[in-house]
Image: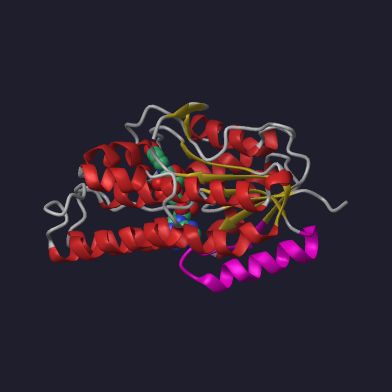
Amino acid sequence: MSKKVAVVTGANKGIGFAIVKGLCKAGYTGDIILTARNEKLGQEALQQVKAEGHQNVLYHRLDLCDQSTAEELRKFLENNYGGLDVLINNAGMAFKVSATEPFGEQADVTMQTNYWGTLAVCKALLPILKPKARVVNVSSFVSKRSLDKCSPELQAKFRNSDITEEELGGLMKDFVQAAQKGDHEAKGWPNSAYGTTKIGVTVLSRIQARVLSQTRASDGILLNACCPGWVRTDMAGDKAPKSPEEGAETPVYLALLPDGATGPHGQLVWDKEVHEW
Ligand code: NDP
């Protein structure tokens, strides 16, 4: 049997870096691939983890917005591990409240990374999931808050348990187009680019879990969206109540759901509890 392997995206700092260390501290027996888009930042993070005594961590480049890096990572995983056991899609971005870019531009850029970038990584890596694999898509409680601010029609679409990936992608495009025209609120969207991209991540997770249940029913794979809580990082600032280590707890819990567990699956989880969508 090949060695187990876990991949964490956006792991050079913040919650992703804490997830890598959390997996190590939990005694993850396989290799852990700390990925980052910036080689120097990734290598520096790797050296810090190794200095703490964790020798089973490796660096691999992964940029959510460069599909070739996801394909290279897939080849690396296939050649060295025969597939993938744990995928934690943590990488994400948000404009600061003080950002001066027009809202339409913020919507486009945030969507490219958080929704389309996460989807691109999934397209490359979900096909090589091994039986009993665990997938964690780091979304946010802001996805639920933003859902509640959508028009009843949009809420019904995002809560529809039969929504397809194509329909979801169409809705994400509709939001960006409306944001660029400036009529997104008139069309029933919330006034949050980040929040809408995270609606996309949560709904995508529900779709992916459903598809896995249909196509790989006997493989025991569990896939969830989660919220790390409000965490002190470069993204959220220093007033947030949780440390990165505390923010990593729910993603690590979902990544290490024991063999034989039947859930949670296709859920939005925070503080290790399933929350209604
Ligand atoms: P940080 O800004 O501290 O870290 C974000 C990480 O994502 C960095 O490693 C960054 O790399 C990486 N990243 C951004 N864009 C890309 C890309 N195109 N390709 C690869 N990596 C990329 O944020 P957090 O640690 O706070 O956030 C981690 C996740 O948690 C995000 O998905 C965020 O939305 C979510 N979250 C965070 C909350 C919080 O309170 N902090 C609350 C709820 C959810 P680089 O250093 O190169 O920019």
Location of residue 28 in the rendering, given as x and y in whole percent from the top left corner: 73, 38
Q: Nearer the viewer, residue 57 or 64?
A: 64
Front residue of this view, candidates 44 and 116: 116
Residue 103 in sight from this viewpoint: yes
| Quadrant assignment for the C terminus | top left
Does the magenta segment cover residue 62?
A: yes
Write the residue at 77% across / 45% down. Answer: 30
Left or right of 238 on screen, residue 227: right
Task: Give 247 or 44, whichever is nearer the viewer.
Answer: 247
Q: Main secondary structure of the magenta part?
A: helix
Q: Is residue 88 above or below residue 102?
A: above
Left or right, 92 with reference to 18: left
For the record, the magenta segment spans: 59-82
Q: Residue at x 74, y 34 (%)?
A: 259
Q: Vertically, is 120 above or below 254?
A: below
Residue 83 position, x and y percent, is: 74, 58
Q: Where's residue 63, x and y in %?
A: 51, 64
Q: Is residue 132 visible?
A: no
**Which residue is pictured at 78% across the width and 40% down the height?**
29
